[in-house]
Image (cartoon, rainbow, N blue to C red):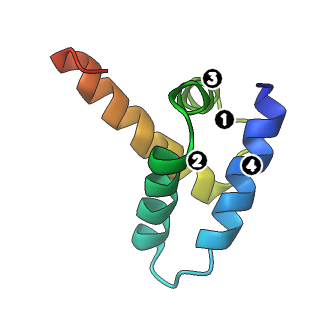
Amino acid sequence: MHHENLIKMANDIGSFFQSDPDPITAVEGMADHLRRFWEPRMRKAIVQHYQAGGDGLSDLAQAAVKKLAAESAALSGIGDG
């Protein structure tokens, strides 16, 4: 899947969660959505895009993907990532 499609999808999801008045809840909600509904290859690709600078991702999408990246790094450190 092309990064452009993933960026658009992530930003669209972020637009939905942006309506939450609590920014922390919005980030967690979006990260949870990505965990639950995006296949592993999609999550891996968006994390790699974020780690390469995250061009095009909204602030909320960047924060949610940053959370996924941290979780992925923690899991790989214990052999489950």
| Residue type at tag 1 | Gly
Q: Which residue is mark 2?
A: 62
Q: Local crowd at mark 2 within 10 Å, few (<14), some, or many (≥20)?
A: many
Query: Considering only order in the chain, which callout, 4 or 1, is on the residue closer to the N terminus?
Result: 4
Q: In the image, residue 23 lies at what x, y percent? A: 47, 72
Residue 9's disc is: 4
* Tag 3 and tag 1, C-beta contact below 8 Å: yes
Residue 65's disc is: none
Distance in Å between CA atoms under marks 2 and 4: 13 Å
Q: Secondary structure at mark 3?
A: loop
Task: Residue at 81% x, 37% y: name it.
Answer: 5
Q: Which residue is mark 1?
A: 54
Distance in Å between CA atoms under marks 1 and 4: 14 Å
Distance in Å between CA atoms under marks 4 and 3: 18 Å
Q: Which quadrant of the structure image shows residue 79? A: top left
Image height of 42 relative to 17, above or below: above
Q: Local crowd at mark 4 within 10 Å, few (<14), some, or many (≥20)?
A: some
